[in-house]
């Protein structure tokens, strides 16, 4: 009897079939709860799980066959490699044993030369330093980031019940971190819809950075309240002095610099500098805040003055841009007054509101006072002060959901 090619009634059926074929857990979960997924949501889930979308939308059987064939070939070669590796290990076992024994002997000899207390202290300090270094370079290893289109991003937020009206009313913000901006934000047409989507994308990134600052701030005051600090705490302090560019290790300076950026100011500056997420720098280099650089890693403005050699700093993901912006406002001499007034508000136990600090950011742009007026206008017209009191929703996942 001849084999019959499976024909699908719709493109959606093809996507469901692919999800079932590759065992996508999320699609199974939605199916069990009788919740109907849209085509956009199905595509997003397949992309997240590394599954290619069907090219021939009338039937995906050929695609499935080809991918299974490729997987079989890959598995076959992998099996051969494993067998070869095991054989190699067996053959070289005597030599490896001799090398290991020699290393063990050398290590034990060195252990006896070093006093026990110093040895354990140095080992512990190295581990802590390594962990801190890894934390500082957390963005360097992120690859294969994707840019969702505006409709998909909007549908995702709707699905998760993330809306700005609820946030303004006191609802906590879902920790969803997009790695790139949608490249088609301008196609939304509706200015309000475009701006709201931009705020939804950037807001969790700003809140996450502010939360990290507040966690560090609590830890700082806890350390300062102690009579004796551990080796780990001393290394942590050393790292924070470096992060906030304090060469003389002045604790007063650290307390002033280690503080949040008002959310309304960060949103307004991101909106102004990136054209609400539509500028070339934002789309090509994830540059939300238009920071300048004179290094090779940057994007050159098209109509730049011939006498100027600056570029706009680019980043691998949006979160890195927010972190660099925070470091800029918290360390650069141009914003010293901004930090001092913020510290005064803290001392007087007042809330840190964006409109109370905008006037101290005139040095951020060449147009000075006019720039402050623009920022205040963006904050007031879009009611961004509502977000100064916003908080992230706690999650079991350390980094939230990154897409």
Image (tube, rainbow, N blue to C red):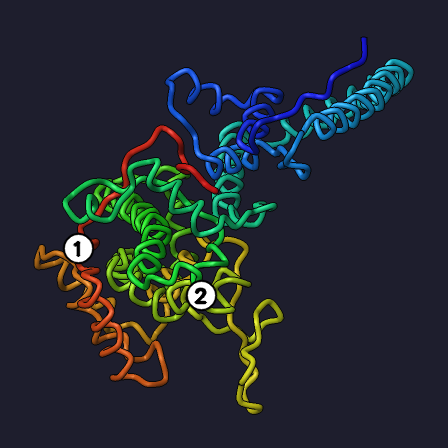
Residue 384, by quadrant, is bottom left
**x%, y% of residue 388?**
20, 55
Residue 246 shows in this picture: no
Q: Residue at the spot x=20%, y=67% of the render?
A: 381
Q: Which mark is in front, 1 or 2? A: 2
Image position of 356 with respect to 32: above or below: below
For label 2, the residue is 278
Q: Residue at the spot x=39%, y=69% of the render?
A: 275
Identify the mark nearer the N-term, 1 or 2.
2
Of helix, strand and loop, which one carries label 1? Answer: helix
**x%, y% of residue 197?**
35, 53
- Disc number for residue 386: 1
Q: Considering depth in this image, is 221 or 13 the residue closer to the camera? A: 13
Quarter containing the N terminus: top right
Image position of 33 with respect to 401: above or below: above
Q: In the displayed image of the protein, which residue is found farthest to the front?
A: 1
Q: Is residue 266 left or right of residue 178?
A: left
Residue 401 shows in this picture: yes
Q: Considering depth in this image, is 162 or 21 the residue closer to the camera? A: 21
Q: Alpha-carbon neighbours of circle 2 within 10 Å: few (<14), some, or many (≥20)?
A: many
Q: Is residue 344 left or right of residue 51?
A: left
């Amino acid at each position: 009897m001849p084999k019959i090619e499976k024909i699908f009634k719709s493109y959606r059926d093809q996507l469901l079939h692919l999800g079932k074929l590759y065992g996508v857990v999320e699609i199974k979960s939605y199916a069990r709860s009788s919740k109907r997924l849209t085509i956009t949501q199905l595509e997003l889930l397949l992309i997240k799980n590394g599954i290619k979308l069907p090219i021939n939308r009338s039937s995906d059987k050929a695609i499935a066959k080809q991918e299974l064939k490729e997987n079989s070939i890959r598995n076959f070669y992998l099996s051969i490699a494993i067998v070869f590796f095991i054989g190699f290990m067996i053959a070289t076992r005597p030599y490896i044993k001799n090398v290991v024994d020699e290393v063990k002997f050398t290590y034990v000899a060195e252990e006896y030369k070093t006093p026990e207390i110093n040895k354990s202290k140095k080992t512990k300090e190295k581990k802590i330093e390594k962990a801190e270094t890894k934390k500082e370079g957390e963005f360097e290893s992120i690859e294969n980031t994707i840019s969702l289109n505006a409709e998909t991003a909007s549908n995702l937020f709707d699905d998760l019940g993330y809306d700005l009206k609820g946030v303004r009313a006191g609802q906590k913000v879902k920790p969803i971190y997009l790695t790139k901006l949608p490249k088609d934000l301008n196609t939304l047409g509706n200015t309000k819809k475009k701006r709201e989507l931009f705020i939804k994308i950037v807001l969790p990134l700003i809140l996450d950075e502010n939360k990290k600052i507040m966690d560090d701030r609590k830890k700082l005051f806890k350390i300062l309240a102690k009579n004796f600090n551990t080796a780990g705490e001393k290394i942590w302090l050393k790292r924070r002095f470096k992060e906030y560019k304090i060469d003389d290790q002045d604790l007063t300076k650290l307390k002033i610099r280690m503080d949040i950026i008002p959310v309304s100011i960060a949103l307004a500056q991101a909106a102004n500098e990136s054209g609400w997420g539509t500028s070339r720098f934002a789309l090509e280099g994830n540059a939300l805040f238009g920071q300048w650089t004179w290094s090779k890693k940057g994007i050159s403005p098209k109509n730049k003055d011939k006498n100027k050699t600056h570029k706009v700093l680019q980043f691998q993901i949006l979160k890195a841009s927010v972190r660099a912006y925070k470091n800029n406002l918290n360390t650069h001499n141009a914003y010293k007054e901004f930090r001092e007034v913020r510290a005064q508000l803290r001392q007087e136990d007042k809330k840190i509101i964006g409109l109370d600090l905008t006037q101290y950011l005139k040095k951020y742009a060449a147009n000075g006072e006019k720039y402050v007026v623009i920022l205040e206008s963006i904050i007031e017209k879009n009611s961004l002060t509502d977000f100064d009191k916003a908080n992230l929703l706690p999650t079991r996942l350390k980094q939230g959901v990154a897409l």
